[in-house]
Amino acid sequence: MDCMQQTTHNITDTNTDHCRLKLVNFETEENHSFHETQGLSKEHLVVRRGKPFKLTLLFRSRLWNLQTERLVLEVVLGSLSEKIPVQFSDKWSDPRGWSAKIYPSNMRPQSVVIHVCSPVLSSVALYDLLVHIETIQDRRSYAVGSFVLLCNPWLKDDPVYMPLDVQIQEYIKSDYGLVYMGTHLNISKRPWSFGQYEPGVLEACLKLLQVSPQHLSNTHRDYILRADPVYLSRVVCAMVNCNDDMGILVGKWQGSYKGGVTPTEWSSSADILHRWASSNCRPVRYGQCWVFASVLCTVMRVLGIPSRVVTVFNAAHDGDGSLKIEELYTSRGEKLGLSKDSIWNFHVWVECWMRRPDLGEGFDGWQVVDATPQERSAGIYCCGPCPVVAVQKHCLGAPFDTSFIYASVDADVIRLIVRDGLVVGRMVDTESVGQLIYTKGIGSDRPENLTQTYKRTKNTESFVGLRLVRERDKRKIHKEKGERTAVTQRMSTHTETKLSLSSPGGMSPSLEVSLTLDRVPLVGENINMCVMVINHSSSPRVLMEHLNAQLKEYNSSQVETFWKTHKQVHIQPHEVLRLYHDIPPSEYESVLAGDDIVNLAVVIKDVRTKERVLDTQEFNIGSPQITIEIEGGDSIQLKKEHTARVSFTNMFTKPLNGAVLTVEGSGLLQHKHEARLVLLQPGRKIEKKVSIMATSPGTKLLMATFSHSSNTRIVSRSFQKVSVMTA
């Protein structure tokens, strides 16, 4: 909308005695600056609830007659409306209701400035505005336009109030973020453009609310409930995935991505929101957890709810609600995909900041909201908002989905060795799940470690007491919701201690094993590992060592073994034995690409007693580097051409067929640029020079990818953050 909005209602009577409205100036630029909404929309006035905004009314010949005429504003939201008499008082008539007032100094012969203020608990929506001039005999009405009302994290009485300005800058205003991925041993990060200032993004977020099942089934109720950020977060969370509604994203974790975009190719929420909105709400293909989370974060920031993207490394997916994750291995160390539960090497969700009056102030603050469709919550695929503090304090009955989130960061892992259908070894690991929890630091590209906000230090607690709390809350959850099955009888009858293994004869374990990497390798380097075995018994022993390496997906889908070895070894009483192994590149480079995840497992078996012990390690192999250099540095001038040079060197021992280097960047390049080579020899380089030009200020991302036909999966991807400065 233009700053000056011509009224859409024309008065046909020619009586010059009547006061007639000519124009309404929505004072967009000034209001947007005052309300911290600059850049969110070029089509609408965007203001925040609980804070006054200005309107200038211009009349055709004169102001209304204060003795015989009354000026009334009306805000309309669907079938809801509220009339607001314009007052001259310096005090708002009711801080809980809509108010409109005029300062006498703002009156002119043909114009007047009105200050309008919404209640602090107004609904987030697009409102219509009417102006009425009323007399005893009649009323002249004008539909003068519309405005968008958002949450107000700057206002203390708003449930999303955030006290520190640096937090608001990071969690509301920043359009740039980082997503942490990989494994806790080798963390990678990728930039993400939230894009809330891109044209059409705010309108797409409002459209998302309008096509939600809640709105379509009961518009009146939905509009009323939109004042509550708890309600808003659940609606938006469910709408980011398309499983139950006209939502944004289709999730896909394996197989072909033909007919859509491979999830790793996304780097901007705006691109996804534009595709969804412009296709009449057809779901965009495809997303995975970090894509769901990043889009959710964008929508929440646009609506005015402080949000951040959070990565949990070794996140458990507890499908049966037992707070335990079962993993099965063969006696030769091969991981089996037979359990409904799983552990994701990383999982990404969102934390939203809000008060929780439904639970009490002890549960205010960061709330987990997870849009990745995993389990149903109250019948739909959404998760949260779950108070982080409820997870830390083990209040597993707190809404919403606290037990599921708790299991994600703190479940016990039961690792079973099976042979011929029988369990021949068992270990309990209470430490690996939720091993590290990261988010982007405030005003920095360094990570902030959130692990202790979710997890209390276990050695300060009574294990028995904690288990009783868990069981009590589980019974409560099962009774109230009936959504997840009870703990299986076989699992519940085991005696659990940290990293313990029950030997076949019921004796305490006399073998201890650990599997470690020398360091996380890059593609093209040896994978070096060490198996350490400790004999706690007073007898020499003959052992069989079985070592197995499998490629796996980050969400725990494993494929066939690509390397294995076994040998017999001897160990003396109380000896510490170290067994060193390496996997050369020639053994894995046809299988593994950069950032691929490997599951290593070792099983040590006592030949005489049949005692078996197991240890595992998972890591992501380092990706070969793509070099991105921008002439003059990473800060560029708006609408000025700059040169970027991108290159990739083949670090493999074999030539790569059909090498392709691709460069793209939203807001920097209009289309993709490619360099191709039929054959890229070992140690040789492929390069591409591109001319970039930014069309708008802010943070942009230049992305480069390298792929080759010898392995259809992308070998490497790199990003460069570019700061665009105005002259």
Image (spheres, rainbow, N blue to C red):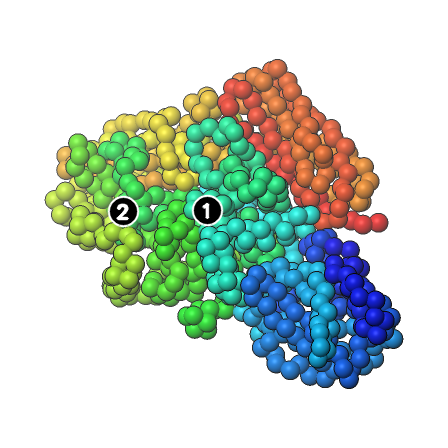
Residue 16: image x %, image y %?
A: 85, 71
Residue depicted at x 27% and y 47%: 414
Q: The residue under label 1 is which amino acid type?
A: Asp
In the figure, is residue 343 to the left or right of 645?
A: left
Residue depicted at x 32% and y 26%: 565
Residue depicted at x 58% and y 77%: 96
The image quarter in which residue 515 lies: top left
How many other residues sit within 10 Å of disc 1, few (<14), some (14-19) or many (≥20)? some
Residue 656 numbered tag: none
Q: The residue under label 2 is which amino acid type?
A: Ile
In the figure, is residue 316 to the left or right of 305?
A: left
Marks 1 and 2, how far apart at CA: 36 Å
In the figure, is residue 44 to the left or right of 716?
A: right
Name the one closer to the observer, 591 or 248.
Answer: 248
The residue at which mark 2 appears reads as 414
Name the one closer to the observer, 409 or 485.
Answer: 485
How many other residues sit within 10 Å of disc 2, few (<14), some (14-19) or many (≥20)? some
Residue 320: image x %, image y %?
A: 28, 49
The image quarter in which residue 518 lies: top left
The residue at which mark 1 appears reads as 245
Secondary structure under badge 2?
A: strand
In the figure, is residue 38 to the left or right of 328?
A: right
